[in-house]
Each structure stands twice: as structure tokens, then as C-alpha cells.
Image: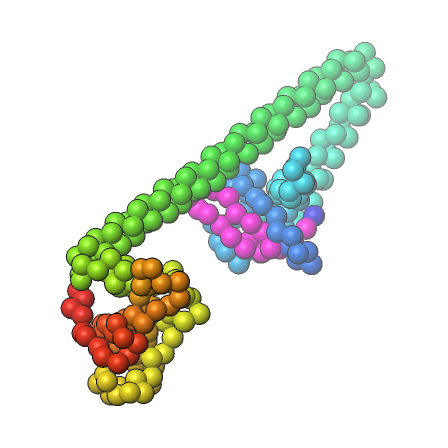
Amino acid sequence: MQSGKIKHWNQEKGYGFIDVDDQNEDVFFHVSKVRLSQPISVGQSVYFNSKRNDKNQLRATEVTSSSLSLEQDTASDTSRYVPNNTKRNKNHSNRNSNRSRQTNTSNKRSLGSTLFSLIAIIAVAIYFFGDFSSTLSQYTSDNTSQVATTDTATTSITGDAQIDKTIALIQQGGPYPYPNKDGTTFYNRGGRLPAQSQGYYREYTVPTPGVSHRGARRIVTGGYPPTVYYLTVDHYDSFQRLQVP
């Protein structure tokens, strides 16, 4: 018998995990194994028995609200067993019959328990697979949406593919061609842009076709998130404000 607290509980799918006292490994439990006097909730103290499955994962075989429940079950099983022994001792003629009935009952319980555990494992697998499929679908949808947004931006702002692509990357937060440089503070030391507090301006590289280095083209944004965009094609000597929606 072990004790712990409910660490995670998924009401919709009927499973959770127990944070075990004096043990680092959490224990998985299914609602079918729970016998509590109140609704399951995170932080609730419980007592339980557990064993490892064929994948060496800990699974709770019974979860109750007190250790007394588990002890009573054990005592109840013992009391039922004693009369059967007494009857066999008193009535030798029925000994074989009693043993046969007990064996059949035990086999039926074992088979029922095995089938129930198998159904529970299949149900959990379906739930996990459903979550994975949902997450994958959402991820694919989000990526498709981002690609569509980027494609629209690169054809509708300035007409320059590299400039428009850089604006799209700024609006979606990257990834940038020069991650150690792009997004750093532009200090406006030449005073060619309106005076603002330090950190207001940030600069991003606009790749130049045919050039293997960063080149001279930059987009400088103002505000965070950006509210104004400036383009320089001569390495900060002059700036042109861009109309970015």
C-alpha cells in the first residue's frame, strides 16, 4: 500500500497521475480503479496499490481515500476464505466440488480482470492517439496559415521580394537569416531617425541577391511590437519610411 496526491486529472478522458510520497516516479491511474468518497481533484490525498505492466510502467490497481479501505478489503477476503475452509473440513464429501467451484470462480475473475485491463489500455491508447492527431492537425493548420500569410506579405507591400520577406519575418517573429544580428538594438547614432529612447529601434538584415555577406540593406523598426518601419539601402546613410499595414 502506498500514499500520495493526485498530480494530474483529465476528467474528460478518465485518467490521471499520482505524485507518490517518497518516490520520484509518478503512478498512472484510470477512473475504473478509483473508489473515492468524493470527486477526483488535483491535490487530493489518496492511498493505492500499484504494479508494473509489461512495459515496466507503474499502474495503480486500486485507488481509495484511506488506507482503511484497502485493509478492510483484505480482511473481508480472508473472512470469506475461512468459512470455505471450515466447510471443507466439516464436509469431506463436498471437498472436491467446493474446490472446483472456487477454481472456476477464480478463473472467471482473473479472465474478467484481464479483459477489463486490456479494454482500459486500449481506451487510453485511443485517447493519446486522438490527442496526437489533434495536435498534428493543429500544427499543420497553423503552419499552412503562416505560409499563406508570408506569401501574401511578400507580394503586396513593396514589390521587392527580399524586403517583403524580411517584413513578413519581422511580423511573425523569425526565423531570421542572421539570428545573432537581426532584432538587436539600433542606436540611431547618426540621428537620421526621430529621437527616441534607447531600445525603441531595432534592425533587421535585408539580403541582397548575389551578395554572400549581410550587404548594406536593413529594415529598422520602431516600437515593440513594431509600429513604424524604415528602409536603408546604403548602410544607415539614408532612410525611407515604409507603409506597412
- For the residue pair 66 and 196, the one nearer the viewer reads as 196
Q: Is residue 170 left or right of residue 243?
A: right
In this view, 220 is above or below 14: below
What's the residue at 80%, 25% (across, down)?
86
Say if the magenta span includes residue 52.
Answer: no
* Residue 106 screen position, x and y as percent: 69, 23
Q: Is residue 83 left or right of residue 42?
A: right
**Bounds of the magenta segment:** 2-19
- Magenta stretch, overall SS: strand
Residue 138 in sight from this viewpoint: no
Q: Is residue 90 left or right of residue 217?
A: right
What's the residue at 33%, 80% (across, down)?
186
* Residue 205 screen position, x and y as percent: 34, 68
What's the residue at 50%, 56% (across, down)?
42
* Residue 54 screen position, x and y as percent: 67, 35
- For the residue pair 132 and 165, the one nearer the viewer reads as 165
